[in-house]
Image: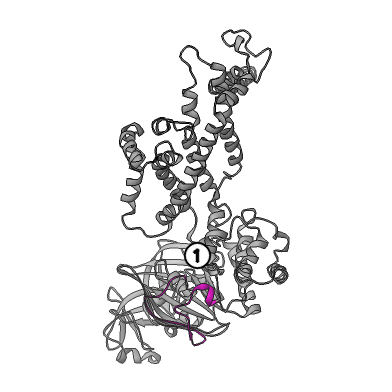
Amino acid sequence: MARVQLVGVGKHFGQTAAVTALTLDVAEGEFLTILGGSGCGKSTTLHLIAGLESPSSGHILFDHDDVTALSPRERNVAVVFQSYALYPHKTVAENLAFPLRMSRIAAADVRARVREMARLLRIEELLERKPRQLSGGQQQRVALGRALIRRPRVFLLDEPLSNMDARLRVALRQELKALHQTVRTTLVYVTHDQEEAMVLSDRIAVMHAGNILQCAPPRDIYARPASRAVAELLGNPPINILDAEVNKTSVMLPGGQAVPVPATHAAWLTRLPQRFQLGVRPEHLSLTAASGCARARVRHVEHLGKETHVLLEAESYALTVRTDADHVVQPGETAWWGWDWSHLLCFDSQSGARLLT
Amino acid sequence: MNRPRVTQFFSKRRDRVIRYVGARLLVSVGLLFTLAFCLFPVLWQVITALKPASDLATVPPFFPTQPTLDHFHTVFTQRPFARILFNSTAVAILTTCVCLLAGTPAAFAFAKLRVPGQRGLLTGILAVSMFPPIAIVGSLFLLIRFLRLRDTWWALILADTTFTLPLTIWVLTSFFRDVPDDLLRAARVDGCTARQALWHVFLPVVTPGLTTAALLTFVFAWNEFLFALTFTATDASRTVPVEIALFPGVHEMPWGEIAAAATVVSLPLLILVVVAQRRFVSGLTAGAVKG
């Protein structure tokens, strides 16, 4: 177990910068997720921590020791790859034993630890099989076992669940969380799946274009995103963004509709720039005349069973609203919609930074 | 009303059955014919090798009535055939070794490392093996004479490598490309040095590729005729194809001996292919990665 620190770490491949001046502090035993779209530099960051790539600038510290120049072997890290990367010519037992054999551990110990790991991951009956004879979930467990068996200081996972079908993914997610609670190893997890990140992590680091935009616990990231980009990355269906203006008494929606600002939100009138962007999550919108802000036409209705998503369309904006499953609206109708003032987010139109924090 | 429909149903079904059986029959006959066309010369050669000299010119009997090993005996006692076989084996094995030793690192670089001008280099390498051997045999001869390698194994190994190394590099490059990068990364994370990763992970995974390349090279070197004819002069380095071509005397054509020798030299290839076939396991990295 180790505390992992990245201090101003950059990585260039030729002319293109994969990661720029990254600073990250992972506490001992923490489950930290790096969340970002493809090409944002999250896998590169993982490879840098593992020692598979060496940074172009900056330092990597494990427990305050500079490990920047050390090989993966010397860092004692373990990685689970997206493709699992099991050795196809070795049996499950040999796969598990391989990291131990490479560190010259006595054969009897190796056997004991392979058995112990197989028991922990419930793959005891698979030990003599070859990887190609295993199902996806089983291969994944073997990959986890091969990573854990060495008792690494840091445990790194690169999208380990992305090749699974949805049901298996949920089951393995819970197993992974439980496993981390058992072994308590510092764990860095890379994913593009926001739900995985929300469910698993102690903290989420949101990455975009080689930078970490925000690093905070899941609930904070969701409720108080630092910027519009972070807000847009989390949440499903995604957050609604409206270009808005504020005058002496009201917020003006695109198209000129005025919504009076209540007394509780008087700060809006004084502290917001005249033009700003309004972020409102679908679950903070409602289709009731009572709290109504404006009227719009119903474009689509999606029934998901537990809830219903309604896409509203007006002349100059569109909104997704999440309502109860039993709320009945028909496409083509005109409906009043309203928002929950306490959950609105305001962003700077230029920089995207959150205002009124 | 029903009757015509029923009969039509049956006749339709019968049609289908007939068509199906017909198609199967046609395919089977075609296959048998192709097989016979390909294998008959081999069979004929074996039969000829086993017939006594007196029966050689006459058919019937098609099969030897009194099979004999006389021709084999003659080949090995009255000619330096053992030495020639040894030359062929040595040249083929050494060529294969040189090709694999030189080709594996080259292919690894092309497949897994960033090589500047990769496309141009690969095309250039392929172009080398595209020249007809007859076009370069003259200049190669001058080179071999200059290097004082005439009538040695090394002359043949050098010439054969010129043609088989590009092929080896191409075959291996495409095999190596299929090895996932994550597999090599996993090896490094699991504590391998570069050499250990090569030995414990990479080579076992690419064994089918290495076997394929080795087999192609071996067969090429074993069968090669033009260079062997040009660069060899004596038993010291002459290979089997050239030796067999030199069997005919001024007045007679020793068909029996030619057939016996040809049967002997076919055997190693047959054994190699059968043994190697088990190595060509389908799916090079099946089970290494998902999806």
Magenta range is: A52-75
Seen at 55% across and 29% down, the residue is B81
User: Could you say where residue A240 lies in the image, as x and y percent from the top left?
Assistant: 39, 73
Task: Verify whether residue A159 appears in magenta.
Answer: no
Residue type, numbered disc 1: Ala
Quick one: A38 or A312, which is closer to the camera? A38
Is residue B42 found left or right of A292 in the rendered image? right
Quick one: B233 or B209, which is closer to the camera? B233
Query: Quarter-wise, where is residue B151 in the image?
Result: top left
Is residue A194 found left or right of B14 in the rendered image? left
Query: Quarter-wise, where is residue A117 in the image?
Result: bottom right
Quadrant containing the N terminus of chain A is bottom right
Is residue B37 found left or right of B115 in the rendered image? right
Quick one: B239 or B21, which is closer to the camera? B239
Quadrant containing the C terminus of chain A is bottom left
Graded by Cα atoms within 10 Å as few (under 14), some (14 to 19) or many (20 or more), the crowding at tag 1 reads few
Is any atom of residue B33 visible in this view? no
Q: Is residue B161 above or below residue B60?
A: below
User: Could you say where residue A262 lies in the image, as x and y percent from the top left?
Assistant: 38, 88
User: Could you say where residue B56 lies in the image, as x and y percent from the top left?
Assistant: 58, 11
Quickly name the residue at label 1. Answer: B194
Q: How are the residues colored?
A: one colour
Query: Quarter-wise, where is residue B266 in the image?
Result: top right
* SS for dot 1: helix
Task: Verify whether residue A63 appears in magenta.
Answer: yes
